[in-house]
Structure formats: C-alpha cells, structure tokens
Image: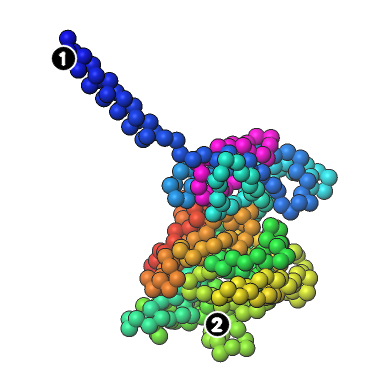
Amino acid sequence: MLKQLLRTLIVLCALVSFTACSSDSDSPESQTSLKLELKVVPTDIQVKEYKHLTVTFKELNTGFTTTQELKNTNILQVVLPSGTYHMMAEGTIIYTNNAELTEAKVSGIQTGVVINGSEVTKTIDLALKSGSSDLILEEVFFTGTKTPQGAMYFGDQYFKITNNTDQTLYADGMLLIQSAFMTNEKQDYTPNIMASTLSAGAIIRIPGTGNTYPVKAGESIIIAEDAINHKEFNSLSINLTNANFQIFKEDSDDIDNPAVPKMVNVFEKMVIHTQGYYAYALARMPQGMTSDALIAQNSYTYQYTLTFGGETYPMDGTAVKIPNEWITDAVNLSVQDSFQWLVTSPSLDMGWTSVSAFDGDKSRFGKSVRRKVIGKNVEGKNLFKDTNNSTADFEHGVKPSLFN
C-alpha cells in the first residue's frame, strides 16, 4: 500500500513538473494591435473605391511574414508580433479622372517601421503605378573595372536600354535621368514632391528628330560613358567603340569618338558613381517640349537640414522635377549595408538592387545589375522581368553582358 502511494506521488510530481515546463516554453510572445491606414497621394486624387488591396508584413529580425487582404476598404486591423517591420502594399483603386471613373494600380512601401506596445496606428502612402510599355533599363554597368595591376579603371561604364515590347519603338528624345537624391543618405527634403515627381540631379537626352533611331522588339542600344576601345588601356575592360551613343561633357577634358553620336546634355553633368547610390530613370517629354522649356518650367529649389558632428546646417539645392507619368522605367541602386530609402515613388520602383555588400567593397568592380530573363519573344529575343520592383526584377553583381 505504501509503495503504491509513493508511485502515485512520483507520477503526480512528474505531471506537475511537465506542466510547469510546458507553460514556460509555450509562453506567448508580445503582440501589438495595429491599425493601418492606406492613403493615396497626392491628396487631390478623389478615390471612389478601394477595390482590392494586399499588405505584406515582414519582421526584419525574425523573418516572420504575413499577408493581409482588404476589399472595399483602406483600413486594416491586425494583431502582429511586436517588432520592426518592412511593409509593402499593392492593389487597385477606382478614382475620378476628369469626371470619369478610372481603375488604376497602386503601391506603397515603408521600411524600418517599429510596431510595439498594446496598440499602434500607422499609415502607408499609396501612389499610382505607371503602366508604360516603352524602353526599359535592361542593364546598368556602373562599377568600372580593375587593371591587371589592381588599379581602378573608369570610363567603361554603360547603360543598356532595351525594347521589351512586341513592336518597334524610337529612342529619339528619350531622357536618361540620374536622381538628385542618394539612396544611402535620407534627408527630410522640403517640398516633398516624391509622390508625383522624380527629382533629377542630371539629365541627358538621346538626339534625333522622332524616327531617327528605331529599336526593334527585343533589341537594345548602348549609352557609353566613353565610346572607345578601353582594352587598349586596360586589358580587363571592353571595347565600346560600337556603342550607339556616348556621354560627352563639352566643358570637361572628356574623350570624344567622332563616329558615335553624343547624348544631349540637358541638366548638369551626369557622373556615374561606381557604387551606385542613385536612381536612374528613362522618361519621355510631352511632344513638342524642348530641353530649355523643360528646365524653365520644372526647376525647383529644395531645402533640408544637414546634421553632422552634433551640429545642424540649413542646406538647399536645385533639381528638375520630372512628372511620374513621363517616366517609362526606373531603377534604384544602392549598397547593401547602407541603403536608407527609395528616391523614387514606389509607383515607379518598389525595390532596389546593388552590387556592393558594403561601402568601399572592392569586389564590385567588373560587375553590373541586369534584369532577369523570363522568356523569349516571337523573334527569339530575350524578354525581361519588369514588375516595377528592382529587388525582384534584377540580377545583382553579375558579369556585364557586353563582357561575354
């Protein structure tokens, strides 16, 4: 009888111990109730219906990911594990456009959003997504190369612009734009016009009268920094004498290949940074607009406060605002460990791509970013991924295509 009682007590103690341990290991993590408002900008867009929206949350430390769907509403109530999140929203709305109802795609993104406490309210700004079917930036080779002796070599950078449609397009008049702002240096710029325009720090334009430079479906043109045979100066570089266009700065000690047409300098000098740091975009001006009219009508001054060494300094600068609807394609470039923000509206590019893992990464030389191939067109030419999300669309740190 005593032995049976002792066995019973041992079993009860084991059960109590197991229950206590289970309770400790299964203790719930901290949760936060989030109220999220999705708001279309600019605010003068009169939204009639939020037809369908999805919001994806990714916790940056744990990788926890969840996607929520909304129909006929722009307010989301959701309970999430407390943390720091990357939030991405996409969907369709119906809005009033010149007294007519128009359906359009929208998107928005926020990163580094802290969600903690019992309750919190956040907002994601949504912008209209452009649906252009025009030339795209297939590849950007911005890093330059190294010589056999290990010295840095520049001037062999290039842009590869491709017709990703099924019809012949003309490159005449196409603008190639470098952003005024840097992806690794976030500032509170005033006025903040990013939702509707891209702030250009440098602009060059393809010459032509309208039908001078046809680009067939699936074919490409090359815009070279210097259209010379760089292998004569660096055996590890490339011959760019067959480039379609060259970037030439008239008031600089620049190299001119008389056999290659020059890009037209519209605003400031385009200097291609070997680590990225900027966004690049293609755009078409309205028919009949001249370069002078573009600058006269779209130049603006922005202000911001620079903080350095504990001191603050009021700063300003001048840029040219390019309406988002003019832009056919855009790509944000950066460095992996120093990216801070997108310098375009998410409607143009929801992501970014890179070559360098860190500032000063010497392994970047001789590498480019290039769009992923998703198939072939009827002529057997490559079709490239173009979802307005450079993170998803581009292979990063690959061998430049012209080096093959």
The percent coordinates of residue 22 (x first, y second) are: 35, 30
Q: Is residue 27 magenta?
A: no
The CA span between labels 2 and 1 is 104 Å
Q: Residue at x 23, y 16 (%)?
A: 8
Q: Residue at x 52, y 39 (%)?
A: 31
Where disc 2 sits, the SS reads loop
Q: Residue furthest front?
A: 2
Label 1: how many Cα within 10 Å (few below 14, some 14–19, many 20+): few
Q: Quadrant of the C terminus?
A: bottom left
Tell me the quarter of the picture where residue 13 sits. top left
Count of numbered labels shown in the rendering: 2
The percent coordinates of residue 377 (x first, y second) are: 51, 52
Tell me the quarter of the picture where residue 200 sits. bottom right
Amino acid on which disc 1 is placed: Lys
- For marks 2 and 1, the one nearer the N-term is 1
Report the residue marked by disc 1.
3
Q: Residue at x 64, y 58 (%)?
A: 345
Classify 315 as above or below 71: below
Where disc 1 sits, the SS reads helix
Q: Are marks 2 and 1 in contact (CB under 8 Å)?
A: no
Report the residue marked by disc 2.
259
Q: Quadrant of the N terminus?
A: top left
Which stretch appears magenta? 67-90
* Residue 278 as seen in the image, left or right of residue 52: left
The percent coordinates of residue 296 (x first, y second) are: 78, 74
Amino acid on which disc 2 is placed: Ala
Q: Residue furthest right?
A: 99
* Prevalent SS, magenta region: strand
